[in-house]
Amino acid sequence: MNRAPLKRSRILHMALTGASDPSSEAEAGSGEKPFLLRAVQIALVVSLYWVTSISMVFLNKYLLDSPSLRLDTPIFVTFYQCLVTAVLCKGLSALATCCPGAVDFPTLHLDLRVARSVLPLSVVFIGMITFNNLCLKYVGVAFYNVGRSLTTVFNVLLSYVLLKQTTSLYALLTCGVIIGGFWLGVDQEGAEGTLSPVGTLFGVLASLCVSLNAIYTKKVLPAVDGSIWRLTFYNNLNACFLFLPLLLLLGELRTLGDFAQLGSAHFWGMMTLGGLFGFAIGYVTGLQIKFTSPLTHNVSGTAKACAQTVLAVLYYEEAKSFLWWTSNLMVLGGSSAYTWVRGWEMKKEQEDPSPKEGDKSAVGV
């Protein structure tokens, strides 16, 4: 029996769901280190991921919506972060070439054919980071995770639309919990008078783009020889060029010219720091997956979202109702349950790889 189409389908579905590959986990655990050393390494890597991710969210909130900064140029902030990431990639590539062994980084040479191949992903990538930042601009950090919580639901929808794959009842139930938590959160934000319909819409669009980004990343990786860093370089470089007409059309360059702190070293320092965090999050995410597993990474991300919400409420001294907290728990609980269900189902599929009746796994993306 030819199982190649089924394998391609499983790989793409893993990209959508974030589930781990049991065979790769077995390989990763074949040469295990002493338990204490491994535990310390995992703790340090997970802590690094949490600190980087949470710091990036709070810093971006400052750059996008700080009363003291008063900078209304969300597209420029996003453009600058992409520019910093592209420059860092090129700089590390040059350093690795000059000092072999000191830095482990792939060689980067601009190839227009590769840039064109990555372009479809870059369009989705622009949508993802732009809508993420616009959502963060208009909603509070505490509501940010709920506003962007429908990624899992879009994963299920795209799995069906693109792969014609049905989803188990248990997974659908967890999606129902997430949707319920999302609507309850929107209702409670409205009841407290802090709801931003525009910000919520941007959050939904960001969730859709995150799902699409996972699909197109898998599709485009062969064009960059499977190198995530090459993909990061081309993605951010393409994004810089695609952002330029948006900056002109939306008048953000004119707004930036009138900005009172344009010559401030503090402002450019914070902008550059935001770009550094944007670059670092890709590295620490890969590091966390390497030292744990994709499944554990998803669980860690859910726990980080909970901690981030609590920190935001404390930092901004907000008072939230019981139902508001319930909505967050529903979203986080539903996401954790979905991750667990998909991991369990992927292991079952690995043990019994024969295609089930009704599966149409040869559909391409």
Image (spheres, rainbow, N blue to C red):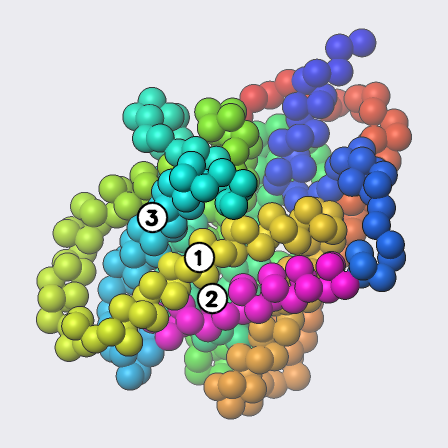
Q: Earlier in the sequence, mark 3 or mark 1?
A: 3
Residue 146 lies, in percent from the top left, at: 56, 66
* Marks 2 and 3 in Cβ contact (< 8 Å): no
- At x 41%, y 53%, the residue is 129
Q: Residue at x 70, y 29 (%)?
A: 10
Q: Which mark is residue 278?
A: 1
Identify residue for label 2: 56
Q: Is residue 264 left or right of residue 48?
A: left
- Estimate how packed mark 3 is, as few (under 14), some (14 to 19) or many (20 or more) residues with alpha carbons within 10 Å: some
Of callouts 2 and 3, the N-terminal one: 2
**What secondary structure is marked by label 2?**
helix
Q: Amino acid at mark 1?
A: Gly
Residue 244's x, y, as percent? Answer: 20, 47
Residue 199 visible, this orientation: no
- In which quadrant is the N terminus drawn? top right
Callout 2 amino acid? Met
Q: Mark 1 or mark 2: which comes first in sequence? A: 2
Q: Is residue 22 above or below residue 42?
A: above
Q: Residues within 10 Å of mark 2 (few under 14, many from 20)?
A: many
**Please, what secondary structure does the residue beneath circle 3 have?**
helix
